[in-house]
Image (cartoon, rainbow, N blue to C red):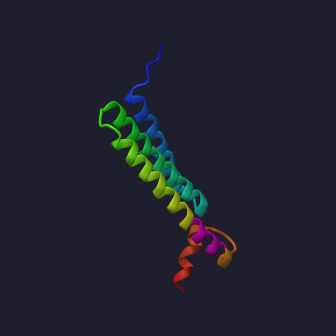
Amino acid sequence: MLVVGLTHYLVLSAFLFSLGLYGIVTRKNAIMVLMGIELMLNAANINFVAFSRYGNYGIGGQLAALFVIILAAAEAAIALAIVLNIYKTFANVDVDDINNLKE
């Protein structure tokens, strides 16, 4: 019988964080970059909850994860509004074209 411990959660979190970082670095589509950021935030949430559970820190980890979830929802709403405005201006959401906003 497999007992799930802290190490399993940390490996899962490291995998999700790496996947999110890869998505941010390699993608040019703004929506995909936002999805990478969300993956990285969820990896941090897994760490908060896992350390709270296995470190006997009470509900501090769950409260931090809840705060990150609220922050991610606000970030997604604002970022999607910006992406829609960029799409309206340039007819695509390529991150390289955003540099033209300065001109």
Q: How many marks?
A: 0
Q: Quadrant of residue 97?
A: bottom right
Give the vertical position of 4 relative to 35 (above or below): above
Q: Position of residue 24 (x, y in %)?
A: 51, 56
Residue 90, position in %: x, y?
Answer: 66, 76
In the image, residue 81 sits, relative to residue 72, either above or below, namely: below
Question: Going by the picture, which residue comes out furthest to the right?
Answer: 91
- Give the main secondary structure of the magenta stretch: helix
Residue 9 position in % (x across, y down)? 43, 33
Relative to 2, does residue 10 appear above or below in the rendering? below
Task: Residue at 44% x, 48% y: name it.
Answer: 66
Query: Is 83 positioned to the left or the right of 66 in the image?
Result: right
Outermost residue, bottom side = 103
The extreme top residue here reads: 1
Asked if the magenta segment contains residue 81, the reply would be yes
Asked if residue 56 lies in the magenta stretch, the reply is: no
Q: On the rendered image, what quadrant is the C terminus found in?
A: bottom right
Is 41 above or below relative to 86?
above
Query: Residue at the location (34% across, 30% down)?
Result: 54
Which range of residues does the magenta coloring cover?
A: 79-87
Q: Would residue 98 appear left or right of 14 to someone viewing this image?
A: right
Q: Nearer the viewer, residue 6 or 94?
A: 6
- Image coordinates for residue 69, horizontal then vertical, percent: 48, 51
Q: Quadrant of residue 29?
A: bottom right
Q: Residue at x 57, y 71 (%)?
A: 82
